[in-house]
Image (cartoon, grey):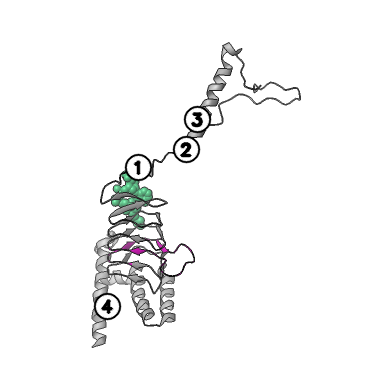
């Protein structure tokens, strides 16, 4: 009886996993269920994780770790057996994905290759992200620490996230910052991360233009038409060294 229930539950889980692949992977359109189960690395990693997670919960931790290690070698997807993963989880492509021990993943979450749900150091306890339902995390994104990624959020490829992400936000960049929340650009004085002022560049520009003004004043005919400031005219000095020739300001701007 228990065996039949287990088979029925496993069958239902696999059907949901295959449905997630078909819904979210354009390359899976028109591909049969058997082929998807046999050749999608995200499916293999997820199936292996289900077994490893159950064994881990039952106290068979060595066996659980062994299964996780084999799945990692085959798929390039490393999921700690203790990680909590909801329904409809889909890892596209696989390779380089790491899901840490205390990570919690809700339903219908998609990860692309190279995603890390990791810790920030050697802290113990809850130290990995919590990802709520319907979140998509782009390739190469790093989510670090016990942060929460809200429902329906999108994390851009190569984003580094170290703070909580509000629900239905799109977060990009390093450090990750919201560029859309509920479909709208965030407003307020700190909202434009892309066009922040650069005080050092502004100061260098100011100095450069001041030098140019001084040079043109020194070269003016009313000042004797000298071609140089401080003797920088290319003529020979008494010690035999030639002065540097006058040219465009190297200060740039
Ligand atoms: C983040 C992402 C989900 C955004 O999708 P979206 O909701 O359609 O949002 P938009 O394309 O309108 O982008 C919103 C803004 O973020 C910028 N942006 C999008 N993705 C970005 C990224 N990865 N890094 C930096 N900026 C990014 C856009 O240029 C746009 O900027 P703007 O506000 O100046 O116009 C998507 O760009 C992404 O990175 N998806 C991951 C896909 C992936 O990893 N595929 C791998 C397949 S193998």
What is the CA distance from the residue labelled 3 to the residue labelled 4?
Answer: 69 Å
Residue nearest the observer in this picture, 91 or 194: 194
Say which of marks 2 and 4 sits in front.
Answer: 2
Q: Most prominent secondary structure in the magenta stretch? A: loop
| Mark linked to residue 189 | 1
Q: Residue furthest front?
A: 189
Q: Of all residues shown, which one is farthest toward the right?
A: 239
Q: Is residue 120 magenta?
A: yes
Dots 3 and 4: beta carbons under 8 Å? Answer: no
Q: Is residue 188 above or below residue 9?
A: above
**113 or 216: nearer the viewer:** 216
The response on whether ligand 1 sits within 8 Å of label 3 is no
Q: Specify the label residue 78 is tagged with.
A: none
C-alpha separation, residue under disc 1 versus residue under disc 4: 51 Å
Q: Which residues are magenta?
A: 105-133
Q: Residues within 10 Å of mark 1 (few under 14, many from 20)?
A: few
Outermost residue toward the bottom in this view: 1
Does 243 sit left or right of 96 as displayed? right
Give the camera-side residue of 2 and 72. 2
- Provide the secondary structure element on which disc 3 rests: helix
* Mark 3–mark 1 CB contact (< 8 Å): no
Location of residue 69 in the rendering, given as x and y in whole percent from the top left corner: 44, 74
Residue 206 - label: 3
Residue to which mark 2 is pinned: 199
Disc 3/disc 1 C-alpha distance (Å): 25 Å
Residue 130 falls inside the magenta stretch: yes
Residue with the mark numbered 4: 10
């Amino acid at each position: 009886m228990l065996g039949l229930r287990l088979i029925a539950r496993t069958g239902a889980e696999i059907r949901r996993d295959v449905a997630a692949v078909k819904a979210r992977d354009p390359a899976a359109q028109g591909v049969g269920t058997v082929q998807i189960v046999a050749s999608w690395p995200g499916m293999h990693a997820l199936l292996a994780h289900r077994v490893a997670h159950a064994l881990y919960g039952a106290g068979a931790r060595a066996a659980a770790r062994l299964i996780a290690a084999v799945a990692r070698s085959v798929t390039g997807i490393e999921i700690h057996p203790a990680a909590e993963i909801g329904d409809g989880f889909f890892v596209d492509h696989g390779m380089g994905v790491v899901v840490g021990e205390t990570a919690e993943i809700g339903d219908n979450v998609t990860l692309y290759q190279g995603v890390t749900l990791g810790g920030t150091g050697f802290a113990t306890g809850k130290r990995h992200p919590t990802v709520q339902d319907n979140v998509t995390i782009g390739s190469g994104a790093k989510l670090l620490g016990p942060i929460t990624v809200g429902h329906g959020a999108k994390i851009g490829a190569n984003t580094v996230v170290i703070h909580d992400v509000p629900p239905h936000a799109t977060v990009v960049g390093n450090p990750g910052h919201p560029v859309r929340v509920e479909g709208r650009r965030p407003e307020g004085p700190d909202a434009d991360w892309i066009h922040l002022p650069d005080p050092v560049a502004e100061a260098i520009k100011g100095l450069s233009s001041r030098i140019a003004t001084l040079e043109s004043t020194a070269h003016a005919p009313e000042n004797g038409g000298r071609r140089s400031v401080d003797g920088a005219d290319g003529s020979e000095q008494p010690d035999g060294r030639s002065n540097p020739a006058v040219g465009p300001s190297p200060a740039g701007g």
